[in-house]
Image: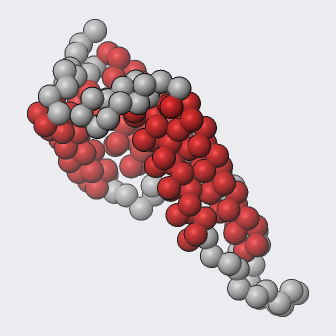
Amino acid sequence: MSLQRIRTKDHAGALLLIALGAGVALWGRTYRVGSLTEMGAGYIPFVIGVLLIAVGILVGITAKAPPAIIPNLPGPKKAQRGIDARGAFCIVGSIASFVILGTYGGMVPASFACVFIAAMGDRSNSLRDALLLAGVLTLAGFLIFSWALKLSLAPFSWG
């Protein structure tokens, strides 16, 4: 894989994020947006769309130009790598666990399982690191949504 292709992928990803963010923001504007203190149905989609646009711009700006490449030089070649099956499985598994446990188990088990499974998709994370990350983020989410924002989310719901 050439560096030029990597650069193209970064810029293509940035454009995709910007386009997706613009679509979500425009879709959110079709509902009442409201204000920060009185949020309407379109507030969260609009904010998420704007954040996607901002992330897309940052990805596009930070994409580096490839250095000058002199073709046909002898030397070691990097092995081509395909899709990392572990990472892909963990991403899909974390989303599925959040949906299933969020429906049948409540916010705490759904959040913990989602973060833990996603963290295990990174080969550099140890079991201890994934458990610690999942525990801290679950506690933070519980405190933010239940205590600080006073949202009536069931921390545990069996059935």
Above or below residue 30? Residue 76 is below
Nearer to me, 96 or 59: 59
Q: Position of residue 124 (x, y in %)?
A: 42, 62
- The residue lying furthest to the top in this view is 159
Residue at 79% across, 86% down: 69
Q: Quadrant of residue 23?
A: top right
Q: Position of residue 101 (x, y in %)?
A: 34, 23
Where is the N terminus found, in terms of image quarters? bottom right
- The residue lying furthest to the right in this view is 72
Q: Position of residue 154 (x, y in %)?
A: 20, 20
Where is the C terminus found, in terms of image quarters? top left
Above or below residue 148? Residue 96 is above
Q: Position of residue 58 (x, y in %)?
A: 52, 63
Q: Quadrant of residue 3?
A: bottom right
Q: Is residue 127 visible?
A: yes
The colour scheme is: secondary structure
Residue at 51% across, 31% down: 29
Nearer to me, 62 or 28: 28
- The residue lying furthest to the left in this view is 147
Please state if 92 lies on the left or on the right of 117 as rendered.
right
Residue at 23% across, 30% down: 108
Please state if 131 lies on the left or on the right of 31 as rendered.
left
Nearer to me, 27 or 109: 27
Above or below residue 15? Residue 146 is above
Total numbered circles: 0
Q: Is residue 97 visible?
A: no
Please state if 75 lies on the left or on the right of 62 as rendered.
right
